[in-house]
Structure formats: structure tokens, C-alpha cells
Amino acid sequence: MIKIKNITKSFGNKLVLSEVSGVFEKGKPNLIIGASGTGKSVLLKCIVGLIRPDHGQVFYDGRDFYDSDRVTRIEVRREMGMLFQGGALFDSKTVEENVRFPLDVLTKMTRPEKRDRVNFCLKRVGLENVNSKMPSEISGGMKKRVGIARAIVNNPNYLFCDEPNSGLDPQTSILIDELIQDISEDLDITTIVVTHDMNSVMGIGEKIMFIYKGRNVWVGNNRDITHSGVKELDDFVFANKVMNSLRNH
Amino acid sequence: MIKEIGKYFIFLGHLFINRETFKTYYKLILDECISIGLGSLFLVALVSTFMGAVTTVQTAFNMVSEFIPDYVISQVVREMIVLELAPTIIAVIYAGKVGSSMAGGLGTMRITEQIDALEVMGINSISYLVLPKIIASILMYPLLVIVAGVCGMLGGYLAGTLTGIISPNDYVYGLRTSYNEFTVVFALIKSVVFAFLVSSISSFRGYYTQGGALEVGVSTTQAVTTSVIAVLIADYLLAQLLLSK
Ligand SMILES: Nc1ncnc2c1ncn2[C@@H]1O[C@H](COP(=O)(O)OP(=O)(O)OP(=O)(O)O)[C@@H](O)[C@H]1O
Ligand SMILES: [Mg+2]
């Protein structure tokens, strides 16, 4: 479980996040949604510690991330897996080396153990026979999946995904969403997914946080989202034609 | 400016805290050595051969007096190459070739979030990415300078003898006359310092790239400019410190 409290961040005099608080639960994907430029990525980066918030706290199962010593912070870091918006694969390494990387650096596993684990994770994301390809030789959707494989290879307790299905076709999107959901349930880990895709929201949105102009405006699930009574959220949800036609029926 | 320098020193500090195991670095350093050393060998040899050739021809051209024996030409060539041309001019070439590729590589890793990916795994990205580059530079650059010295004198020999400016015997005699080992030691000291400056400054520029592909280009150029300026200043300071009597 991850708890955030009063996260505030501004760049220069531009306030991007303002007093965002919330709880992300274990065993299911927790969605952060909102329009483009509202600060979702910044919020995610504040949670994992890539951007230091001006003030506010982040608790990883009770461990205060920003108010702990270096050792604890690294310990928490090593329990994280993250999928970046663009995949962020190391482009000098093959797919296999990319996925194996966290094991190489962070564990003392033997070679065969690592190979098995890597193949297991690649299979899990539906990729086989691409082990020796370079990131530049595979498609965008495959990069995302390799990114997920790398994020889960070291059995993380916390999984973060920044727009896992932006730029993917609807079918692959759904596959990836389901994959993220399955992984969260099977491994019983805390997963946070940033998205602005209504398909994902309706598909896997058991727990949703809606960010509007840097503030946490609404929290709920995909059953309540269509009748929240919050104007900003309605504007966001019903911007989608399909959703809108559903509403009018 | 002052802020940048401060940031640079903090950056250097991060190289040494919370490193990975020695085994991790060993392989990274080897990889860097191969790419830096082999990658620059041809260019360094080419440039220094021509440098030696041109220096010989120009020195001969300037020695108009009948009373100066021919072997002085190669003596002058030796001193120029060992003291200044090999370590310093090659450092400028090195900044252009290796420094720019370090900055470009790190800049690309920054904007494609590869550096963030390392950080999230709990890896100190500065020491993981930059330390091997600096160590490999410090190991390889002095070797390149030695190669440059040899090639430079060889280039001088070829230019001098083929055009009949100086006889082979005189050239070799000149190289060996009143030779002072300290010049070579001084050249190697310089090359270690320059290698450190070029690799650390270029990495610093690349590492803190912000923005997109355009900014990677900007930091690459800045890496070369800043490294060259630092090399020239260090060159002057070292000469003052170690050569003035
Ligand atoms: N490093 C930075 N420096 C200055 N401003 C920044 C920085 N990072 C983000 N911002 C600003 O913060 C705001 C929120 O950006 P963020 O990337 O979080 O948006 P987002 O909600 O993730 O949008 P999208 O859905 O398009 O990815 C933007 O206005 C952006 O300009
Ligand atoms: Mg974003």
C-alpha cells in the first residue's frame, strides 16, 4: 500500500501539483487519470522519487520515503518496478539483457536462474523469440511489453506504469491492461497506472484518482465514474464519443 | 557560471557514493576502454603523423642560419610533440571525438528516461554510467598520447627524410640528443589530467541535458567547448606549476 500526503510541486512559479493526497491499494491497479498536462506524470515521478516535491510525504507500507536515510530509500527503490511512457529500454542492450538487467545488478542469481526468470517474464508479456533483438528492431508495442517484463522481473512490491497503452492499437492496449491487472492480482502488489485512456478506465478502473489542474478532485471506481456529479470529471469522461452516446441512451 | 561549477563538483561527489560491486564496473570499464581506445586510435595516429610532418617542415624552414646543425630540427620537433602537441592538441581532438559521444550518449539516455529507469531501480546512475567512462579515459588517453608521440616523430622522420630536409642519421641523432625524461613524465601527467577533465565535463554536460533531441545537440557542443577551455587552462596551470624554475 502506498499513501501520499499533501504532495505539492511547482516549477518556477508554476504550480503543477497542489496538496494531492490519497491511498493506493494492494492487489489491484490504481489509476491516476486526467487531461494532458494536469500533472499526472509529475505526480508519479514525485511518488517514485525522481522529482522531489516541494513538500508532502510518500509512505511505502509505512516507510516514509522522503524522510528516511539513504539506505532505506535504496531498499524501497529496489522493490519498485516502473514502466516509462516511452519504454526507456537501454538501447545499447538486447531485449534479453534489458530484462535481465535488474537481476544482474541487484541480485546474486546464477546465470541459468536468470535466464529462466527472464524467459518466464518475456513469456508472461507474450513475447517469445525476440531475446536477441535490439530495442531499435522491435515495434512500439513490443517495447512497452519488454518494459513491463523488465519492471516485473525482480518481483517488485510496487509497480508504476506511465501511460502503458499510449500509442498502441486498441487490441494490444487491452492486452496490456489485462496483463497489468493480472500481475497486480497474482503477485499481490501495489500498482499505480497513469492514463488518459477511457478504455483502460472502464476496463480495469477499480480504483481511480482524477487529477484536475494539479488537484485531486475525485476518487472512486469505474461504476461510479459516469455519475460522479463532478463537472470537470464529466467533461473528461464524456469527451469520448462512445461514452457520450452511452450517456444519451 | 559559479552555480554550474558548484553543480559540477557535486556531480563529481556522486561518483563515489553508493557504488555497485567491483565486478559490475570491471566489465563496463573494459567495454569503455575498447570503444574509447580502438575508436580513437586511427584518428589520433593520423592527426599526429601529420602534425609531426608539418612541425618538421616548418622548423626546418625557420632555421635559416648555417651555423645550426640539422639535428636541431628533430630535437625541436621532439620537444614540441612531447611537451605540447601530443598531450594538448590530441586532447582537443579527443574532446571532439570521445567527449562529444559521451555527452551525446548520456543526453540521449536522459531524454529517453533511461537514466530515470536506472534511478528507479535504486542504482546510482552517475557512478554507474560516468565512473567507467572516466576511469577508461584515464587509462586509455595516456596510451593514445604515447601513440601520438611515436606517430608524430615518425611523421617528422618521413617528411624530413623523403623531402631531403634532413638525413635519417641526423634526425635520429637529434631525437636522442640532450633528452630529458621529465618531459615524458610531464606529458603523461598532463594526459591524465586532460583525460579526467574531458571525460568528466562531457559526461556532466550530457547527464544534465533537459528537453529533447535539439538539447542533446546543444549539450554535445557545450561539452566540447567547455572541455577544450578547461584543457587549455589546465595546460597553462600545469606548465606554470611543473616547468617554471
Ligand atoms: N521538469 C519540468 N520543468 C518544468 N515544468 C515541467 C517539468 N515537468 C513537467 N512540467 C510541467 O508540468 C505540467 C504537468 O506535466 P505532466 O507531464 O505531469 O503532464 P501529464 O498530466 O503527464 O500530461 P500527459 O497526459 O500529456 O502526459 C506541464 O504543464 C509541464 O509543462
Ligand atoms: Mg505524462
Image (cartoon, coloured by chain):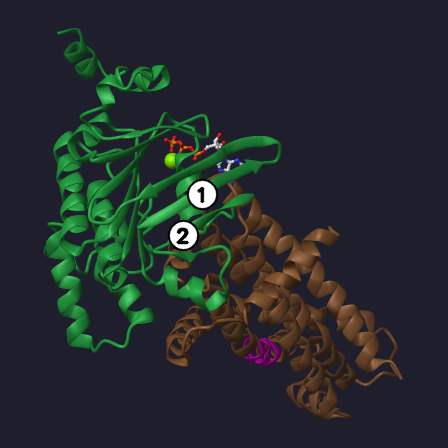
Chain colours: A green, B brown
Q: Nearer the viewer, residue B1 or A211?
A: A211
Q: Residue furthest front?
A: A62
Horizontal and vertical percent for residue B118?
39, 59
Asked if B174 appears above or below A107 in the picture, the reply is below
Q: Residue furthest top?
A: A248
Sequence-first disc among 1 and 2: 1
Quadrant where the C terminus of chain B sits is: bottom right
Asked if A167 appears above or below A127 in the picture, the reply is above
Horizontal and vertical percent for residue B22?
42, 80
Question: Which residue is label 1 attached to?
Answer: A5
Marks 2 and 1: in contact by CB < 8 Å?
Answer: yes
Snapshot quadrant of residue A25: top left
Q: Secondary structure at mark 2?
A: strand
* In magenta stretch: residue A139: no
On screen, residue A33 versus residue B3, left or right, reads: left
The secondary structure that dominates the magenta segment is: helix
Horizontal and vertical percent for residue B219?
56, 48
Asked if A122 appears above or below A103 in the picture, the reply is above
Say which amino acid is labelled 2. Phe
The residue positioned 52% from the left and 76% from the top of the image is B140
Q: Pointer 2: residues within 10 angstroms few (<14), some, or many (20+)?
A: some
The residue positioned 43% from the left and 65% from the top of the image is A72
Q: Is residue B108 visible?
A: no
On screen, residue A131 versus residue B59, left or right, reads: left
Question: Which residue is label 2 attached to?
Answer: A59
Q: Nearer the viewer, residue A11 or A115?
A: A11
Chain for numbered disc 1: A
Total marks drawn? 2
Q: Nearer the viewer, residue A116 or A21?
A: A21
Chain for numbered disc 2: A
Horizontal and vertical percent for residue B189?
68, 80
Instruction: Residue A232: give its label.
Output: none
